[in-house]
Image (cartoon, rainbow, N blue to C red):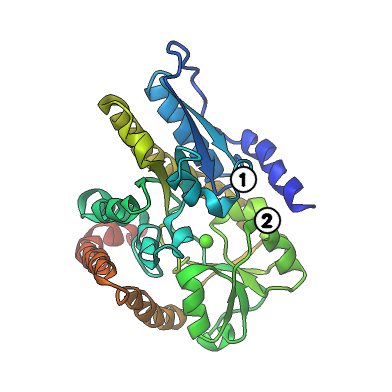
Amino acid sequence: MKRRDFFKSFSSLALLGSLPQVVKATKNKPEYNWKMVTTWPKNFPGLGTGAQYLADTIQNLSGGRIKVTVYGAGELVPAFEIFDAVSSGVAELGHGSAYYWKGKNDTFQFFSTVPFGMTSTEMNSWLYKGGGMEFWEQAYSDFNLVPMAAGNTGVQMGGWFNKEINSLEDLKGLKMRIPGLGGEVLKRAGGTPVNLPGGELFTALKTGTIDATEWVSPYNDLAFGFHKAAKYYYYPGWHEPGTTLECFVNKNAFSGLPEDLQQIVLGAAKIANLDMLCEFISKNNDALNILQNKHKVDIRPYPKEVMQELYEISKDVVMELSLKNDFAKNVYKSYTSFQNKTKNWNEISIKSYLNIEK
Ligand code: CA
């Protein structure tokens, strides 16, 4: 299947699920006709549908005063040009994830996810209540953008392999699609990280161009059919423990809105942030069941020692981000101290609760 056809099939696939229903808000004529450019194929499960949900929510909550038209990757601008497009006002809104723009500023990765970093609940708490949002706003302000958290994948999976991973030795020479900081960690462990767009992964894995790949979690991975190209599905996704998706607004467009509409846009992003996480969690349960019981996938935890060694490497890789400048140092300090603080509470709350045999 050609890549384009593959992505096209998601529109019909997504329709089988429960796409957010658009309430037609027609009582007001749009006062603002906005464009949202995204890094996802249109209606891509979870991510593209999440962008559409946000657009619909802004439209519905504003009673139709803001109309938002969503463009999939490449429809108006290529996926990785949406940051510049919104910054310069080609479109008013963008939907992606902050680690895609690390070329602008390495520190952005903290607003998305870092290896062995925070889970979705911790990330949201840091962003909304722990000072994270203020850092993010400051960082994007330099690019004429107002950022908002607008979704979360939850904990991702570790990836698909065709051989067992019993020790760090098994990662040596392994050619794996794993982007960003996770890729840097794999490299230091002796592997070869490669970055390929989602649509090329199945063929690359099937033909042996790559030995292994990570993508997201059962919901997305089942849609890509990785179980037909790899034998083992390892967990957890240590490199992406709770990836935040973002929406950013052109600053001039945002400040041109009356106060009530500004609040509606900010509120809609919070609603979309929660909705996407719930979408992933509910769909992952169903997809995991299919992978386990229908496709008989060998689902395994990474050995404890492998996790420990990757954690040690990750600590260095993430810490090195803080050495770039004072801003990076402050974000790193805020992020890591928040994560350390939540550790104590997590031990006696969520962790102890989940450990009860039920
Ligand atoms: Ca991933």
Which quadrant is the C terminus positioned in? bottom left
Image height check: is 328 above or below 316?
Answer: above
Q: Secondary structure at mark 1?
A: loop
Can you tell which mark lies on residue 221? none
Ligand 1 within 8 Å, label 1 CB: no
x and y percent of residue 16 in the render?
Answer: 64, 35
Amino acid type of the residue tagged 1 in the rendering: Pro
In the image, residue 49 sits, relative to residue 177, either above or below, namely: above
Instruction: Read off the residue under disc 1.
Output: 41
Instruction: Judge the density around disc 2: few (<14), some (14-19), many (≥20) Cα neighbours within 10 Å.
Output: some
Q: Residue at x 69, y 36 (%)?
A: 12
Residue 72, quarter of picture:
top right
- In the displayed structure image, the side of residue 320 where residue 333 appears, left or right: left
**Residue 242 relative to residue 327: left or right:** right
| Residue 210: x %, y % from top left | 68, 73
Establish if 306 lies above or below 84.
below
Tell me the crowding category of disc 1: few under 14, some 14 to 19, or many 20 or more residues within 10 angstroms, Cα based: many
- Whole-number angstrom distance, CA of label 1 to CA of label 2: 10 Å
Residue appearing at x 54%, y 52% in the figure: 81
Is any atom of residue 304 visible in this view? yes
Which x, y percent locates residue 120?
Answer: 36, 54
In this view, the residue farthest toward the bottom is: 169
- What secondary structure is found at the residue carrying circle 2? helix
Of residues 18 and 41, the one nearer the viewer is: 41
Residue appearing at x 21%, y 67% in the figure:
337
| Residue named by callout 2 | 199
Quarter location, residue 228: bottom right
**Residue 302 appears in the figure:** no
Are the residues flagged by discs 1 and 2 in contact, CB closer than 8 Å?
Answer: yes
List the single residue furthest toward the front: 88
Among all residues in the image, which is located at the extreme right?
1
